[in-house]
Image (cartoon, coloured by chain):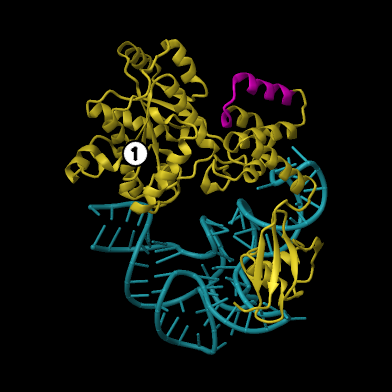
Amino acid sequence: MPPKPAFPPVAEQMKVIRRHAVDLLPEEELLAKLERSRATSTPLIVKLGFDPTRPDLHIGHTITLRKLRDFQRLGHTVAFVVGDFTALIGDPSGRSATRPPLSREEVDANARTFADQVFRILDQERTVIRYNSEWLSPMGFEEVLRLASRYTVARMLERDDFQARYASGSPISIHELLYPLAQAYDSVALAADIELGGTDQRFNLLVARDIQREYGVEPQVILTLPLLEGTDGRHKMSKSYDNWIALTDPPEEMYGKTMSIPDELIAKYWRLGLDSTEADVAAVANGLDAGDNPRDWKRRLAHALVAEYHGEDAASAAAAHFERLFVRHDLPEEIPEVTVSLDGDVAPLPWVLRAAGLASSTSEGRRLVEQGGVSLDGERVADPGLLLESGRTAVIQVGKRRFARVTLSGEPT
RNA sequence: GGAGGGAUACCGAAGCGGUCAAACGGGGCAGACUGUAAAUCUGCUGGCUCAUGCCUUCGGAGGUUCGAAUCCUCCUCCCUCCA
């Protein structure tokens, strides 16, 4: 059992809770809940939904996770809802297309991966994980109708992503309209006091309040947190935009991706991406205002991020690796060894690139050579017709980041 | 149930009988530049054991034609309006 929570005074709790919050609605209700919780020594139930279609957490998710941890430190309980049932629908949030549903096995595997990552930040003792199939699956059609009758099409279509899809003539399936209701019902089942989410979740979170009320459950307070832009600096961080820094990214990858964010985002990453204090954030902002080279703050940021998830040593190694590859353009410390078997005595370079996994096709390999993107033992190659003999070993570099020490073997496998 | 519109490469979107491996934009990749995997500029972006060569693509299946992404028939899916 977790130690008996010692709830700090409400004003103090509010101060912690408010930090970084975008929406905190309605605040009076939260105050009341906190007062009651403290008076009765009962932790509040703080809900966060998790979509098991995307098990890979990234830096953007940590903003919400840290806020959850704040709640845990204040003595409250976190309830995670694994949306294994709702994954059959696919959250239409921010998507332009219907999502394909998942299999049971995928959901389970994703949920496990998710838990591994989440407990890097959260306190396991004060976390409850629930699967929403637990209550959604047994609902009969009658129950679903009852739930669906509590909300109107017009209100549902207020959601800007639905509106955009409808306006642009993209299909919206009826079941997608049910998603916010299902998510809302989770809050009924859990009797959630507070639900967190990114600002893009505002609509879904608010629907839950109405549905809870309909079912005679005290409505939850909603707390939304800022979305962090991804490495491209344009879209919110997301796997689908390929602009994400995953918690599980290897150190060099994490470091390099961080170094590629636009300079304007440095301060924001410090504020939201790290477990930083106001003083840290101020130091960064002041430094940048005073004309510090942004590169230095970005390096510190990259270092701090890697250190948080991989430790100090890994962070230093990643920094050194970055120096070597991108600043000095040297070879990396470790180059993967690849052996390629030839059919004959020689093989054209583009073919070898494909066989060694350095290009996705021979034609792609040919293009890379033609564009000067390929070098052999440090020498740039210009002729796509170049033949390599069997028995030879060479370090082949493609672009800035792909390397392999390739051995050509004459033995047909 | 009725009427009309649509399905094109990773995404969006042109093309409407040959000059189409298919405009353009985004994305991606490469090059130059850079503190940077940023920004900017330039190029590339179906496949093939070495090719001013060959092969396969424009929802699916047939057909017309010397020749089809483009025309016809049927099928599948989507959208809009009317009921």
User: Which residue range is magenta in the image?
Assistant: A272-289
Q: Look at the picture and state if A24 lies above or below A163.
A: above
Please give left or right for residue A50 compared with residue B38 in the image: left
- Whether residue A92 can be seen here: no
In percent of width and height, residue A382 lies at 79, 68
- Main secondary-structure element of the magenta-colored stretch: helix
Dot 1 alpha-carbon crowd within 10 angstroms: few under 14, some 14 to 19, many 20 or more: many
Q: Chain letter of disc 1? A: A
Q: Residue at x 45, y 21 (%)?
A: A73
In percent of width and height, residue A295 lies at 74, 35
For label 1, the SS is helix
Report which quarter residue A276 is drawn in: top right
Residue topped by disc 1: A180
Amino acid type shown at disc 1: Pro
Please give left or right for residue A172 compared with residue A256 in the image: left
Hue used for the chain lettered A: yellow
Q: Residue at x 49, y 18 (%)?
A: A16
Q: Is residue A406 magenta?
A: no
Quadrant where the C terminus of chain A is found in the figure: bottom right
Hue used for the chain lettered B: cyan
In percent of width and height, residue B20 lies at 61, 75
Quadrant where the N terminus of chain A is found in the figure: top left
Q: Look at the picture and state if A160 lies above or below A359.
A: above
Please give left or right for residue A159 compared with residue A296 in the image: left
In percent of width and height, residue B1 lies at 23, 63
